[in-house]
Amino acid sequence: MTSANGSPLSGVRIIESSLLGPAAITTHLADLGAEVIKVESPAGDYVREMTWPIINGVSLLHLHINRGKKSLTIDLKTPEGVSIYQDLVKDADVVIEAMRPGSLERLGLGYEDLKTLNQRIVFCNISGYGMTGPYKNLPAHGIAFDTWAGLVKPAYDEDGFCYIPEHPSMGMHAGPLFGALGVLAAVIRARATGEGSMLEIGQSDAAAYMDWYRSESWMAYERPEDEVTGNKADDYVRRAPGTAGMKEGVRYQIYESSDGHVIFMSSEQAFWRNFCECVGRMDMFEKWPGSKFADHARGNREMQFELRDIFKSKSSAEWIRLGDEKNFPIAPVNTPKTIAVDPQFADRFSIYPASEHGADMLPLPIKYLGEELPAPTFAPTVGEHNEQVLREVLGYDDAEIAKLKGAGALG
């Protein structure tokens, strides 16, 4: 059921000027009930044609990140178009500039211009590298933020050519999430104080921040070894940061099951005991009891040989069931292709169906107990909501709309 007060962000109005992926900053807010008016040039955002897959002539990227939004085309090179934008901002909470910094300012629609119309407006720029630094004007696509942040290791093919390896995209997703968080904080303050603010997000910054554990570990290792050590279980010897330090793990490692792979994570002694009891191998616990915490049995090949054969004896599902029943940490090793059939995934995600949204899509992973977020509307075609926004949001009448069309303000 839906909350009696409507969606969590019902009553929040956002004016978005965006191109491509950074528009995801408002996807999360639209999913939570904010009204997002995507202002486009008459030619439209070419995100509809970008990357694969293309579904019935429209990109999945557009269908997902622009779902739940309204499209209004305005030619901001006309004074009438600028006037429409100004009218939109007067009663809005947020303006999003999801493109290179200064794009709106050059049109007389920057933060300083707009706050004279609406003192409590929150203005957020989200761009590739942010508003400062030597890369601030450098053109980029989403993967650049991950390579810049040190998240992608170059690979080489059989002919010796370097290529981009498969990897999860971080900056293009984390940047919009941090941006949405910052926007909400600013809106709360603006509603309490009547004062707006301007903030900016670099997607590259977000990618680096999401990997803070590795980068901060390397910074820590710059300090003397008597100050910064490894774990007790490693005899305090420093281990490579993050997942690089997991290669030699044994009690914390990926193993083949009879039908796939699982990740075994019994680094605590109590969990290791539970596992050994479960498989009837208390001899392993007696031989290798390990430390109480954070013991991966690093480099213990003899133990690894034993575990390799043990895990091959059962299916992944059987191991997950035993981990749940006997209390030891274990998890499936899914792929982007297989995760949809995982029972935990099926329980947690009610997929928005292609029949209603153009593509099968994941909903926002936020759950309000006792209520259900409304499904977003289909991603808009260019200018689909021109007349609706002008009439319902701005209150323009037929004569005013006709005049704007005649002046070319809508393209």
Image (cartoon, helix red, strand yellow):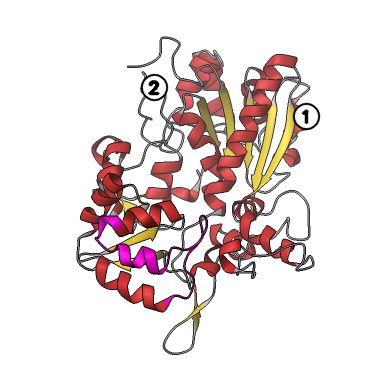
Outermost top residue: 4
Residue 222 percent location from the top left of the image: 77, 67
Q: Which residues are magenta?
A: 277-300
Give above or below for 162 relative to 135.
below
> Residue drawn at (55%, 15%), measured in percent from left and top?
396
Q: Amino acid at mark 2?
A: Leu
> Where, by quadrant of the figure, is residue 153 drawn?
bottom right
Residue toward you, 401 or 389: 389
> Does the magenta segment cover residue 293?
yes
Dot label at residue 113: 1
Number of residues whose C-alpha sits closer than 10 Å to that of mark 2, classed few (under 14), some (14–19) or many (20 or more): few
Number of residues whose C-alpha sits closer than 10 Å to that of mark 1, classed few (under 14), some (14–19) or many (20 or more): some
Residue 194 percent location from the top left of the image: 74, 15
Name the quarter where the N terminus is drawn.
top left
Dot label at residue 191: none
In the image, taking residue 221 as reference, residue 332 lies left or right, namely left
In the image, taking residue 352 as reference, residue 43 lies left or right, namely right
Is residue 365 in view? yes
Which residue position is annotated with label 2? Answer: 369
Q: How many marks?
A: 2
- Badges 2 and 1: C-beta atoms under 8 Å apart? no
> Residue drawn at (56%, 22%), measured in percent from left and top?
13
